[in-house]
Image (cartoon, grey):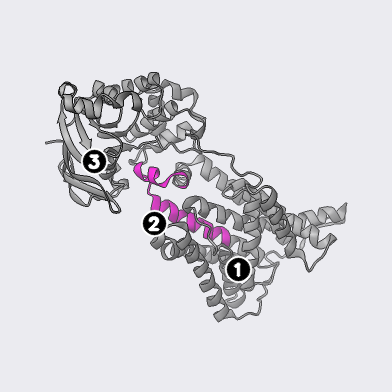
């Protein structure tokens, strides 16, 4: 029983990171109808932001986090202006290619500066964690879960209870109509990119102390997050969260009970099962268009 | 001075010429109907006015100022609200949220917007009990009422209505047009595109008849009905089909 709970705790913790990246996928997809293949790189940029500020410059953690978040916001804005905006009136394919290009570009810039060797980061908190009987709750995992919960709650309040959130939803549902009503569509998409980049950055900040920070991190997290969005139902916000946590739990249990080297494969087995049996995902196609 | 003036406006979708040198005017307080068969260029005219389509030639003036080629987000701030064909209600937002977003062209406090939304339920009483329902769950008639309410929330000087009768049962069509007449009584000018000429001319002060992007004729409802040629070609036969 203790083992089960221990695994569940760790699975939820790592799954929360996937969920944050998956949320970024979904928000950009809903606003622009394009899958952003550089979403995983957002997390890498966030993680390296922490390496630069805390390990290289020796700044305190809280300052490193603030600087990294600011950099992520700026990064999201530049990403929108450079990667999406010039192609906004084209079909989805040129934009998708453009995000893949951006992903390769970002990866190689980091590779050029930091090389392929992974960097290590000190733990975020001084306390190692909490013991509950035989159960050990690692402080970093607790932080990840708490931050993710708080972000999900804030995001819910924003989209459901503010006019700005409603405007962003309107843009994701019908851009031309939103524009006719006077909603500034370009700004709403800009905000979406900034927020999604910050979400990815937060995922990177949170995961940096428990994984080795390297450029390979982006592809790894992005693939799992992508699997999470498929499982949840593409474009669905609660689905992305549930899907992300499901992937985290599945791979943690799979690694313990079946095989550690094949840990990464379990997410994809589930992904394939969903693609074959339930391609619309857990929450997919709830809202249908009525004539 | 006319509220809205189109002067030799031409517009195209790619290589397809949709409007060729159209000139027309709408005076303050009028309901003007744009009539004609499918593909005559009626919707294109509205799209050119609201900024969804940049005219290739010609001038569009609103209150004397040129607006041709202006972005829709700016046009609506000048006081032109466009209720497009197919209602385009936001499917995943509630009725009340759809209504509130209609005021996105102007600054108003949340409380003020709430009061104005409540006033809309007086004009559209059906929407009151539906205010928490998502857009996609509404019937065609309810969506049309919602689209009108959302358009009115912009407090437009000029309301562009595209095919408000499309796909609605005759009884609902009558309801919609009663509301349109009421909108004008409250001081809003209306430019109305309709295939259902009979019902459009029942509320309009003047009508223009278009054919393949050109103006065929114009006049009062009476004049248009009395013009045998126009009636046979564009008005009479189409009525039952369009309704």
Which mark's residue is nearer the viewer, 3 or 1? Answer: 3
User: What residue is drawn where x is 57% and y is 47%?
Assistant: A154
Q: Would you say residue B31 sits in the magenta stretch? A: no
Q: Are marks 3 and 2 in contact (CB under 8 Å)?
A: no
The answer to whether one can see residue B156 in this image is no
Residue topped by disc 3: B212
Gap in angstroms between the C-alphas marked 3 and 2:
28 Å
- Which quadrant of the view contains residue B50? top left
Using the rendered image, report if marks 3 and 2 lie on a common chain. Answer: no
> Residue B61, how many percent across, how many down?
17, 43
Specify the segment rendered in magenta.
A172-200
> Residue A89, how many percent across, how many down?
39, 56
Q: Is residue A126 left or right of residue A175?
A: right
Gap in angstroms between the C-alphas marked 1 and 2:
33 Å
Which subunit holds the residue at mark 2?
A: A
Which subunit holds the residue at mark 1?
A: A
Helix, strand or loop for disc 3: loop
Which numbered dot is residue A47? 1
Residue topped by disc 2: A89
> Is B42 rendered above or below residue A220?
above
**Viewer-nearest residue: A82 or A76:** A82
């Amino acid at each position: 029983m203790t083992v089960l709970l221990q695994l569940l705790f760790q699975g939820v913790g790592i799954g929360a990171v996937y969920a944050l990246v998956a949320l970024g996928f979904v928000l950009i997809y809903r606003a622009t109808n394009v899958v952003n293949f550089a979403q995983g790189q957002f997390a890498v940029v966030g993680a390296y932001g922490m390496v630069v500020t805390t390990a290289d410059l020796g700044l305190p953690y809280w300052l490193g986090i603030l600087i990294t978040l600011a950099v992520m916001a700026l990064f999201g804005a530049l990403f929108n202006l450079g990667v999406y905006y010039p192609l906004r009136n084209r079909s989805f394919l040129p934009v998708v290619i453009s995000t893949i290009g951006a992903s390769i570009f970002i990866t190689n810039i980091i590779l050029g500066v930091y090389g392929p060797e992974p960097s290590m980061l000190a733990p975020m908190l001084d306390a190692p964690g909490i013991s509950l009987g035989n159960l050990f709750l690692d402080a970093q995992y607790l932080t990840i879960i708490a931050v993710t919960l708080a972000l999900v709650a804030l995001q819910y309040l924003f989209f459901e209870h503010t006019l700005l959130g409603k405007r962003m939803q309107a843009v994701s549902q019908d851009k031309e109509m939103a524009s006719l009503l006077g909603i500034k569509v370009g700004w709403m998409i800009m905000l979406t990119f900034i927020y999604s980049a910050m979400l990815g950055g937060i995922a990177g900040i949170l995961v940096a102390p428990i994984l080795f920070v390297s450029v390979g991190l982006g592809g790894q997290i992005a693939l799992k997050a992508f699997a999470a969005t498929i499982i949840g139902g593409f474009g669905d916000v609660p689905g992305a969260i549930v899907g992300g946590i499901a992937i985290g739990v599945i791979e943690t249990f799979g690694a313990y009970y079946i095989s550690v080297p094949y840990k990464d494969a379990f997410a994809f087995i589930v992904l394939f099962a969903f693609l074959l049996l339930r391609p619309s995902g857990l929450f997919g196609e709830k809202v249908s268009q009525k004539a | 001075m006319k509220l809205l003036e189109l002067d030799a406006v031409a517009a195209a979708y790619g290589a397809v010429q949709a409007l060729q040198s159209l000139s027309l005017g709408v005076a303050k307080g009028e309901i003007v109907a744009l009539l004609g068969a499918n593909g005559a260029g009626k919707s294109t005219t509205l799209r050119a006015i609201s900024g969804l389509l940049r005219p290739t030639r010609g001038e569009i003036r609103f209150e004397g100022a040129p607006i041709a080629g202006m972005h829709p987000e700016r046009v609506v701030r000048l006081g032109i609200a466009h209720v497009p064909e197919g209602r385009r209600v936001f499917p995943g937002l509630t009725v009340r949220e759809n209504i509130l977003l209609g005021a996105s062209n102007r600054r108003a406090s949340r409380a003020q917007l709430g009061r104005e939304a409540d006033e809309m339920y007086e004009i559209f009483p059906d929407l009151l009990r539906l205010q928490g329902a998502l857009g996609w769950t509404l019937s065609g008639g309810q969506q049309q009422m919602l689209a009108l309410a959302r358009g009115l929330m912009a407090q437009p000087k000029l309301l562009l209505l595209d095919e408000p009768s499309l796909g609605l049962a005759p009884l609902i069509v009558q309801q919609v047009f009663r509301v349109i007449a009421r909108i004008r009584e409250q001081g809003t000018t209306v430019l109305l595109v309709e295939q259902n000429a009979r019902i459009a001319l029942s509320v309009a002060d003047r009508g223009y008849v278009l054919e393949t992007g050109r103006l065929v004729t114009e006049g009062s409802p009476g004049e248009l009905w009395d013009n045998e040629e126009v009636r046979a070609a564009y008005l009479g036969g189409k009525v039952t089909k369009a309704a």
